[in-house]
Image (spheres, rainbow, N blue to C red):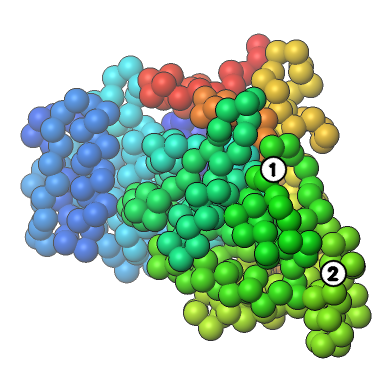
Amino acid sequence: MALRGCLIIMLPIIPRPLSCVEKRGQFELTPETAIFAASSLQAEGTYFAQQLSAATGLVITMKLTASAAPHHVIRLELTDDCQHLGTEGYRLAIMPDAVKISAAAPAGIFYACQTALQLLPANAPRTLPCAEIEDAPRFRWRGMHLDVCRHFMPKEFIKRCLDLLARYKFNTFHWHLTEDQGWRLEINKHPKLTEIGAWRMENGERYGGFYTQDDAREIVAYAQERHITVLPEIEMPGHAVAALAAYPELSCSGGPFEVATTWGIFQDVYCAGNERVFTLLEDVFSEVFDIFPSQYIHIGGDECPKERWKTCHQCQARIQAEGLRNEEELQSYFIKRIEKFLHANNRRLIGWDEILEGGLAPDATVMSWRGEQGGIEAARQGHDVIMTPQSHCYFDHYQSSDFANEPKAFSLQPPLPLEDVYAYEPIPAELMPEEAAHVLGAQANLWTEYIPTTQQAEYMLLPRLCALSEVVWSPKELRDEANFFSRLPAHFDYFDAMGINYRRLKK
């Protein structure tokens, strides 16, 4: 598509659109204002009407019609004229007597609605400034990860996160559901996973929680209404102590185990030579498939110590039987076997970059977190990649070096200030164009070892999530730090109005 750029960036839109021309005048929302759309856009129209009603205090209705709408209405329409913008691109025309939203697909309509909602002033939310906007994303994967295992987060907070993701045009919510410190998803066939694995002792009290399958389906439906895919993560072969506490026979030693109460990497992992491990995991995935329609399933694959495998007769027998050379290839065998099961069920595997060790599963996608080298290597092998290096995408890191005035955070890595997030470029310079095409996008990761509350989680996310939204949506050529910072105050006004916690900019 042609890159036209914003001629005027007075409008505080984040992420920055491809083309944005402010016009004279404004469109006023009144009790008579209605949204007109065809039945194919009923979901988007209903959502937009609800959001406008909540913001303005008016009762904005949505009306189904295939014919031309009267004056002073908001019109949503699908058109072939927007095909060049892709399925997520859109045109938004705000005029004094009408608002027209056009796109090639419903997702584009939805993102145009998000742009319009951002243009409602916090102190006078019944007017929209006149403008002509054309927009489309740079990357197809725009994600955020949330760890609910180290500290459990309630269902309503998950929805609050999804609302934020929608506002900033993210399309993937990576839900980290199992860990050493807790198993958070109900599995009917193996109830001990939550009866035992969801709970631990913390400061002398029982701590934990889990999501029922109905809870998870509710979250998935809520996300789908916002054009967000929920990516479930079930960790393996490591980070499995909570599962081993429930079913110790799945370990190399036989246990007993307790759900972990401290952070770090634990030596006890799933026994790669035990067939019952694969039976349980396939049972788990069979129920996961029924809840999550995501094409991708994340299987972890990171930080798996091999010490138990080295002294386990079942693991060593597996190495011999499969003609493997070492424990690294045993992990690759484990991952490839799971990938084969996922593929047989029309799903695709994603794992952290450690899955490269010992050889990559044929159709695997790599999340590169230990820097970019794993992503570079995977892209050169022809595998798809999602960039999420700690240096720019780990939002559990301190936001500044003013440690005395920041809430406790992960301190083994340098702070990650807002400016560094905004400066991130997901395409490594050393990749050739055909290799760079395998970089699907990037995502923020929020690990919660040091984040016990939802208020602190919001603080760690914002405004860094705003910066990353522009990294993954806007063209590289249009990114400008000073311009971005000039648009932030209007978003802080929104956070204040909604009671959302965030880190204020230091003067």
Mark 2 neighbour density, 10 Å: few (under 14) some (14–19) many (20 or more): some
Q: Residue at x 65, y 45 (%)?
A: 259
Q: What is the number of the mark on residue 193?
A: none
Q: Position of residue 299 (x, y in %)?
A: 63, 63
Q: Judge left or right: residue 152 versus residue 44.
A: right
Q: Where, quadrant-wise, is the C terminus in this rendering?
A: top right
Q: Position of residue 157 (x, y in %)?
A: 44, 36
Reply above or below: 114 against 224: above
Task: Report the amino acid beneath label 1.
Answer: Ala
Residue 308 seen from this side:
yes
Q: Judge left or right: residue 223 versus residue 70.
A: right
Reply above or below: 63 against 351: above
Q: Position of residue 164 (x, y in %)?
A: 45, 38
Q: Secondary structure at mark 2?
A: loop
Q: Residue at x 63, y 30 (%)?
A: 202
Please state which of residues 469 and 81 is positioned toward the viewer in this rendering: 469
Q: Judge left or right: residue 292 versus residue 152.
A: left
Estimate the spatial distance between the alpha carbons at disc 1 and disc 2, rounded to whole Å: 22 Å
* Front of the two marks 1 and 2: 2
Q: Residue at x 27, y 52 (%)?
A: 44
Q: Quadrant of residue 450?
A: top right
Q: Secondary structure at mark 1?
A: loop
Q: Quadrant of residue 31?
A: top left
Residue 474 seen from this side:
no
Give the residue at mark 2: 312
Mark 1 neighbour density, 10 Å: few (under 14) some (14–19) many (20 or more): many
Reply above or below: 316 against 212: below
Give the residue at mark 1: 260
Q: Judge left or right: residue 302 versus residue 96.
A: right
Please state which of residues 100 and 420 is positioned toward the viewer in this rendering: 420
Task: Report the amino acid beneath label 2.
Answer: Cys
Q: Are marks 1 and 2 in contact (CB under 8 Å)?
A: no
